[in-house]
Image (cartoon, rainbow, N blue to C red):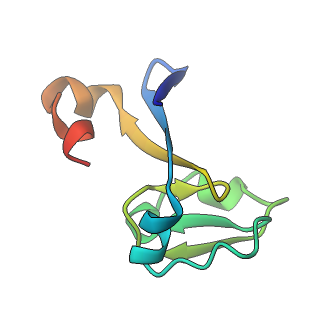
Amino acid sequence: AKQTKKSSPATTIEIADLTATSARDNHINLEHSHVLHISTRQRGNPLIPHIRNVPHTYSKMIPDYIISTSKCILFLSCKYHALHPTYIYRR
């Protein structure tokens, strides 16, 4: 089940279930549940340096962030969504 949380007028965060099969297909080791997995697409994101209290690692994967073995986050700006409304569904 997908939930949408609006974090500010400029951003929308999509939260979706992540299956173990999806993680295995993308070669992501989720054994260490205390580690935040960040997509390589997010390199250069100005918010990443502010994540200090949680160890994080970059991985090539479909979601932008994996926060647990069953939850992931897709980041999408409202401006981009207005220009490309089907992008989130293709992702």
Q: Is residue 44 above or below residue 73?
A: below
Vertical arrangement, residue 43 with respect to residue 10, above or below: below
- Please name the residue shown 46% across and 81% down the image: 27
Q: Quadrant of residue 25?
A: bottom left
Residue 62 drawn at (x, y percent): 37, 61
Q: How many marks?
A: 0
Q: Residue at x 43, y 71 (%)?
A: 40
Find residue 63 and report its image quarter: bottom left
Residue 65 in view, yes or no:
yes
Q: Is residue 43 visible?
A: no
Q: Where does residue 16 sit, x and y in percent of width and height?
A: 48, 40
Q: Nearer the viewer, residue 38 or 24?
A: 24
Q: Is residue 61 left or right of residue 84?
A: right
Q: Nearer the viewer, residue 60 or 52?
A: 60
The percent coordinates of residue 58 (x first, y second) are 54, 75
Residue 70 horizontal/vertical position (percent): 61, 52
Q: Nearer the viewer, residue 62 or 10?
A: 62
Please name the residue shown 85% across and 59% down the image: 53
- Residue 85 drawn above or below residue 45: above
